[in-house]
């Protein structure tokens, strides 16, 4: 018994590519926007806390994410801009912007994880509070917000990788104004006025044309 193998038609392949493009685009937009928002939100929260010895007593100290490192917030803005810009460019430009989006996410993850053990911000506060430039923070501890920022960076990284892999299937901002790459049609010039119709003569004069056709 012969086995008949179905051969995919160009139309079915095009439909599959279009569906893949729509799904990857939706996933990248969701991950990118959510990741940037999470990273920005986390950078404004308390990342670490500790105490400084002031006049024989313990003085509480806290530091926000922006005090520890400004990298996550800055790269979140860069990633969000790259997510928008990826639709304004094509081919090699789109690939470069997608790579920038992915690198922004990776940078946020790295900076956030390094911030989980950073004490420089609290050490500076301890030196100011005690008046001793060599003073350091005591009982240093960190909250979960650096890890939340890392999650936001990971989402941006996923958006960038999706753009690198499937960006060629996504539409561009100017795509709806083009017609399959065809050149714009030339404007048709109005027909010369008929000399035996006075209304056509007046219309030709209004347009600045010579109604006699000379």
Image (spheres, rainbow, N blue to C red):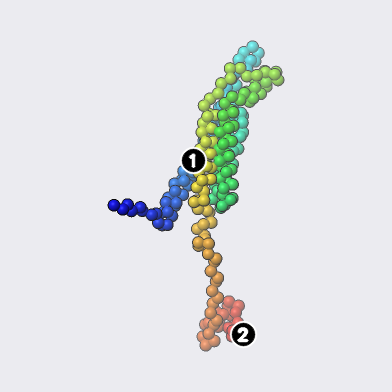
Label 1 crowding class (10 Å Cα cut-off): few <14, some 14-19, many 20+?
A: many
Residue depicted at x 53% and y 54%: 173
- Residue 31, which numbered label? 1
What is the residue that sits farthest to the top in this orientation? 56
**Position above or below: 24 against 61:** below
Q: Distance between the residues labelled 1 and 2?
A: 66 Å
User: Sequence order check: which comes first, mark 1 or mark 2?
Assistant: 1
What is the residue that sits farthest to the front in this orientation? 1
Task: Kindly report which numbered mark, 1 or 2, lies closer to the viewer in this rendering.
Answer: 1
Helix, strand or loop at disc 1?
helix
User: Is any part of residue 192 visible from this angle?
Assistant: yes
Helix, strand or loop at disc 2?
loop
Total marks shown come to 2
Instruction: Write down the quadrant of residue 72 in the picture.
Output: top right
Q: In which quarter of the image is the C terminus?
A: bottom right
Residue depicted at x 60% and y 21%: 61
**Position above or below: 65 against 93:** above
Q: Residue 197, percent across and down?
A: 51, 85
Q: Residue 170, percent across and down?
A: 50, 51
Q: Toward the viewer: 181 or 82?
A: 181
User: Is any part of residue 131 visible from this angle?
Assistant: no
Q: Toward the viewer: 206 or 44?
A: 44
Q: Residue 183, percent across and down?
A: 55, 65
Label 2 crowding class (10 Å Cα cut-off): few <14, some 14-19, many 20+?
A: few
What is the residue that sits farthest to the left in this orientation? 1
Residue depicted at x 31% and y 53%: 2
Instruction: Write down the quadrant of residue 106 in the picture.
Output: top right
Residue depicted at x 60% and y 78%: 208
Q: Toward the viewer: 144 or 126?
A: 144
Q: Toward the viewer: 199 or 33?
A: 33
Q: Name the residue under label 2.
A: 214
Q: Residue 56, percent across and down?
A: 64, 11
């Amino acid at each position: 018994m012969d086995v008949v193998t179905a051969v995919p038609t160009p139309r079915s392949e095009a439909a599959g590519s279009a569906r893949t493009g729509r799904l990857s685009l939706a996933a990248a937009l969701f991950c990118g926007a959510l990741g940037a928002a999470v990273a920005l939100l986390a950078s404004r929260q308390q990342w670490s806390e500790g105490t400084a010895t002031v006049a024989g007593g313990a003085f509480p100290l806290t530091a926000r994410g922006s005090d520890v490192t400004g990298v996550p917030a800055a790269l979140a803005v860069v990633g969000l801009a790259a997510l928008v810009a990826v639709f304004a460019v094509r081919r090699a430009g789109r690939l470069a912007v997608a790579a920038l989006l992915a690198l922004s996410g990776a940078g946020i993850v790295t900076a956030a994880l390094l911030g989980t053990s950073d004490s420089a911000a609290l050490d500076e506060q301890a030196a100011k509070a005690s008046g001793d430039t060599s003073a350091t923070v005591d009982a240093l501890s960190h909250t979960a917000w650096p890890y939340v920022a890392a999650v936001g960076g990971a989402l941006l990284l996923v958006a960038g990788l999706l753009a690198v892999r499937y960006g060629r299937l996504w539409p561009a901002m100017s795509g709806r104004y083009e017609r399959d790459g065809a050149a714009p049609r030339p404007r048709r010039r109005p027909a010369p006025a008929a000399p035996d119709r006075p209304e056509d003569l007046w219309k030709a004069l209004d347009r600045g044309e010579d109604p006699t056709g000379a």
